[in-house]
Amino acid sequence: MKLKSVLLLVVLSLCFSPSRLSAQPVIKSADGYETTVTDPSRILTIGGSITEIVYALGMGDQVISVDVSSTFPPEIHQLPKSPYIRSLAAEGILSLRPSLVITTDEAEPKTAIQQMREAQTDVLMIKDEESFEGMAHKVHAIAKALGVKEKGEALVEKNRVQFDEARQIQSRISRKPTVLFVLALRGTGEFTVAGANTGAKSIIELAGGVNAFNDFEGYKPVTSESILQANPDFIIYMKHRSENIESNIREHAVVKLTTAVKNDQLIYMDGNYLLGFGPRLGSAVLELMEYFHPDQFTSLNK
């Protein structure tokens, strides 16, 4: 009888130990599905900002795979790649045996997300908004899921300090430059540029600039005559496309007449850094702001 009593106590102590009683994080996904994170030991990230946040939270050693849009930090290039965020394939992802998949609400097709969940894989989808608040939401949600809430708060606070600095600089600016963001070329000499309701417009404005085209939404092709009429002070494009875009800008008979080209104010930056709205957002805003308003900086703050 005594032996049975001892065994019963051991079983009860195991079942009701603090580690067993501690609640697993429950996060409501962007699609309304409640995700209970039971095991974050094998994380698969989909989306550049998602990957960066997981690494910035110090959880990179638990990442087993990233999607092809992820470019930072450098160590991710040693990992196997999953498909682009808008062309997911559940079978390939599940073959990597992830215990947790983290992505944004841009993930497609939704049938692939459902198939992963049906295979008993935790999938956390996070709303992706191109703003400081959107970045903070992603960080807080991922930090909660991974059990590192304090690190998430510290990361958001770091960005908040940088944003406060940017706002102080904006308060001293007397003139905001016109800025053109070129996403891509269409053929030779046709430029697809940023309009309203884009991440490019958002970060241009955060950095104290004015987007060159706000009479349409999204990214659309415009004529070279329209670019000359807008006459941007700066032209921005992404680093991985820089050589092709820059040569077309500088050599185009019309576009080369803009103030940006005449004053050699062409800027190229890493796409995820500039438009990812991830954990380096505050740094990206300040860096872009230094290009636009160099007189306001004595040194680059990152």
Image: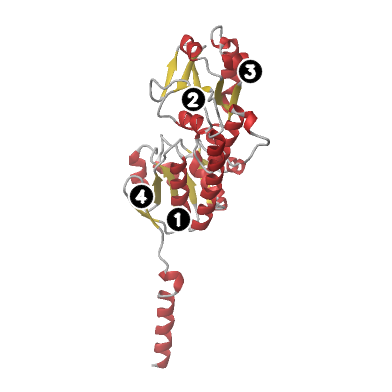
Nearest to N terminus: mark 2 or mark 4? 4
Q: Nearer the viewer, mark 1 or mark 4?
A: 1
Quarter holding residue 91 = top left
Q: Quadrant of residue 274?
A: top right
Of marks 3 and 4, the one in the foreground: 3
Task: Give the percent coordinates (x, y) of residue 97.
Answer: 46, 50
Contact (CB < 8 A) between labels 2 and 1? no
* Coordinates of residue 116 in the picture (x, y in percent): 37, 47
Query: Which badge, 3 or 1, is on the more N-terminal residue?
Result: 1
**Closer mark to the observer between disc 2 and disc 1:** 2
Residue 144 image label: 1
Neighbours of disc 3 within 10 Å: few (<14), some (14-19), many (20+): some
Secondary structure of the residue carrying tag 1 is: helix
Answer with mark 1 or mark 4, whichever residue precedes in sequence.
4
SS at mark 4 in the image: helix
Please state which amino acid type lies under the numbered disc 2: Val
**Mark whose residue sits in front, 3 or 1:** 3
Residue sitting nearer the eye, 127 or 161: 161
Q: Amino acid at mark 1?
A: Lys
Tag 2 residue: 210
Question: In the image, which disc is placed on residue 117?
Answer: 4
In the picture of the structure, the residue carrying the numbered disc 3 is 264
Q: CA distance from mark 2 to mark 1?
A: 36 Å
Amino acid at circle 3: Asp
Q: CA distance from mark 3 to mark 1?
A: 45 Å
C-alpha separation, residue under disc 1 versus residue under disc 4: 20 Å
Dot 3 or dot 4, earlier in sequence: 4
Residue 298 shows in the view: yes
Can you name the residue that lies furthest to the top here? Answer: 253
In the displayed structure, would residue 4 be above or below residue 51?
below
